[in-house]
Image (spheres, rainbow, N blue to C red):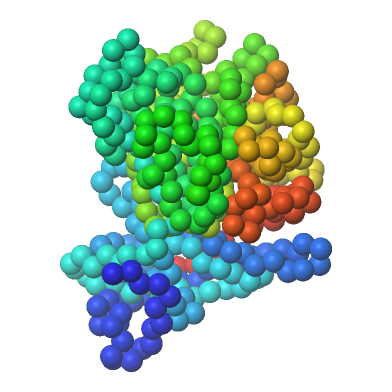
């Protein structure tokens, strides 16, 4: 059964209190009021991340298999996440709406034992499907049928257009937008524009071909990536151009989370060769309900000179940059008629100013060159298509949305246990 917006009271007859008799509270503050053209903006579907270690310190008998989170008398959709894929829960993620400078009191109810997991409307998804039951012939997969998997060690026979992986790589989506990346030598990220808030990826590419390049009821693949960075692809700036993760010894890919409010894909690249260097990389791509943003958390060994990301150069676009600031988050963005359907699409990469080496370009892409800190780097990217429900339709709207996004990243929610 799916539960949504359940009210709760402290009365003995309340079913949630009966099922989850233990409780503790915490506060979550939105420390900022954002105004656009003089109008205060809500902070919708704000991501709340609760560290399991802090929860256990507050409530040692907390049970991650039987809990609910309540705010303002309503149940918040929530999800346990094993970020490290080590079998132990690391975080709880939930989303909530805030007004400016609002503080919410969250009540976490739980049962000390047993398993009573709640079900919520699915607002994110991550998946990976490849064919089984056939075989590779001259690097093309013949026969077989697609099966969804949690993990794949990419076979050495696989390359671009092998017809082995459904829509050529893993996909992830929110109720706003979908993404995929090519799980082969291209390793570039693409955008699925959505005309619905429903989850759609499970139905994309089932024919084994690229029919998703044609408009359908759910939307379509809206970006021409080519040899460029697409949107937010990982690369290294070397010899005057962005070098994607093309030459590797081996690659694995795992679906870490595929939940109602949070989904995550982890890809490990072994022996990525750029110039005279060779690096091992762990890439974690994640998305949260109600958001267009993909968070890209990268770990790399070998002390690389830089990492870079960016946006494919396309005609009829306007280049946008965030207001200058000495710290915090910033963006590089494009807007214009740049989708495969020849309609308006905004794209942005969002990075920490403190990580920036330079903003530059090569023949194919607008590029942001960044400096990993102790082998780690986090950045975001997003696509905003005018045909999505209540989509952004002008450059001015897109810029206002980006500025609000930056303001929210620069003022994270403050959680007090």
- In the depicted structure, whether residue 218 falls above or below residue 54: above
The structure residue drawn at horizontal position 63% and vertical position 71%, both measured from the top left corner, is 99
Q: Most extreme residue toward the left, as rendered?
A: 114
The structure residue drawn at horizontal position 37% and vertical position 30%, both measured from the top left corner, is 208
For the C terminus, the quadrant is bottom left
- In the depicted structure, whether residue 338 falls above or below residue 416: above
Q: Position of residue 116 (x, y in %)?
A: 23, 68
- In the depicted structure, whether residue 33 falls above or below residue 398: below
For the N terminus, the quadrant is bottom left
Residue 215 in sight in this render: yes
Q: Position of residue 169 (x, y in %)?
A: 41, 31
Q: In the image, 357: left or right of 127?
A: right
Total numbered labels: 0
Q: Nearer the viewer, residue 231 or 105?
A: 231
Q: Nearer the viewer, residue 130 or 92?
A: 130
Quarter residue 301 falls in: top left
- In the depicted structure, whether residue 270 falls above or below residue 194: above
Q: Position of residue 269 (x, y in %)?
A: 40, 24
Quarter residue 283 falls in: top left
Residue 155 in sight in this render: no
Quarter residue 239 falls in: top right
Q: Position of residue 392 (x, y in %)?
A: 68, 53
Q: Most extreme residue toward the top, as rendered?
A: 276
The structure residue drawn at horizontal position 37% and vertical position 34%, both measured from the top left corner, is 207
The structure residue drawn at horizontal position 78% and vertical position 37%, both measured from the top left corner, is 318
């Amino acid at each position: 059964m799916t539960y949504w917006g359940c009210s709760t009271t402290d009365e003995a007859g309340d079913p949630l209190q009966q099922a989850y008799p233990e409780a503790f509270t915490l506060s979550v503050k939105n420390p900022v009021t954002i105004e656009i053209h003089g109008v205060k903006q809500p902070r919708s579907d704000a991501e709340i991340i609760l560290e399991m270690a802090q929860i256990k310190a507050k409530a040692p008998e907390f049970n991650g298999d039987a809990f609910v989170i309540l705010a303002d008398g309503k149940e918040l959709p929530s999800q346990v996440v094993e970020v490290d894929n080590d079998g132990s829960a690391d975080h709880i993620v939930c989303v909530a709406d805030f007004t400016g400078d609002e503080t919410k009191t969250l009540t976490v109810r739980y049962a000390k034992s047993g398993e009573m997991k709640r079900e919520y409307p699915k607002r994110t998804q991550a998946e990976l499907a490849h064919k089984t039951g056939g075989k590779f012939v001259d690097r093309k997969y013949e026969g077989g049928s697609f099966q969804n998997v949690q993990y794949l060690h990419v076979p050495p026979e696989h390359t671009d257009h092998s017809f082995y992986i459904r829509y050529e790589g893993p996909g992830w989506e929110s109720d706003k937008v979908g993404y995929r990346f090519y799980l082969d030598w291209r390793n570039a990220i693409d955008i699925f524009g959505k005309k619905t808030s429903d989850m759609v990826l499970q139905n994309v590419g089932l024919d084994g071909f690229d029919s998703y390049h044609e408009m359908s009821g759910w939307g379509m693949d809206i970006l021409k990536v080519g040899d460029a960075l697409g949107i937010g692809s990982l690369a290294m700036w070397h010899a005057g151009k962005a070098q994607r993760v093309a030459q590797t010894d081996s690659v694995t890919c795992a679906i870490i989370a595929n939940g109602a409010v949070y989904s995550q894909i982890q890809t490990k690249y072994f022996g990525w060769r750029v110039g005279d260097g060779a690096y091992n990389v762990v890439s974690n791509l994640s998305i949260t309900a109600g958001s267009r943003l993909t968070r890209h958390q990268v770990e790399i060994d070998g002390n690389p000179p830089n990492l870079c990301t960016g946006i494919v150069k396309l005609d009829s676009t306007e280049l946008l940059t965030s207001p200058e600031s000495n710290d915090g988050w910033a963006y590089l963005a494009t807007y214009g008629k740049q989708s495969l359907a020849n309609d308006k699409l905004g794209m942005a990469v969002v990075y920490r100013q403190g990580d920036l080496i330079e903003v530059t370009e090569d023949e194919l892409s607008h590029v942001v060159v960044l400096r990993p800190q102790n082998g780690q780097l986090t950045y975001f990217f997003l696509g905003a298509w005018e045909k999505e429900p209540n989509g952004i339709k002008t450059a001015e709207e897109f810029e206002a949305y980006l500025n609000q996004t930056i303001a929210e990243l620069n003022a994270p929610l403050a959680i007090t246990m």
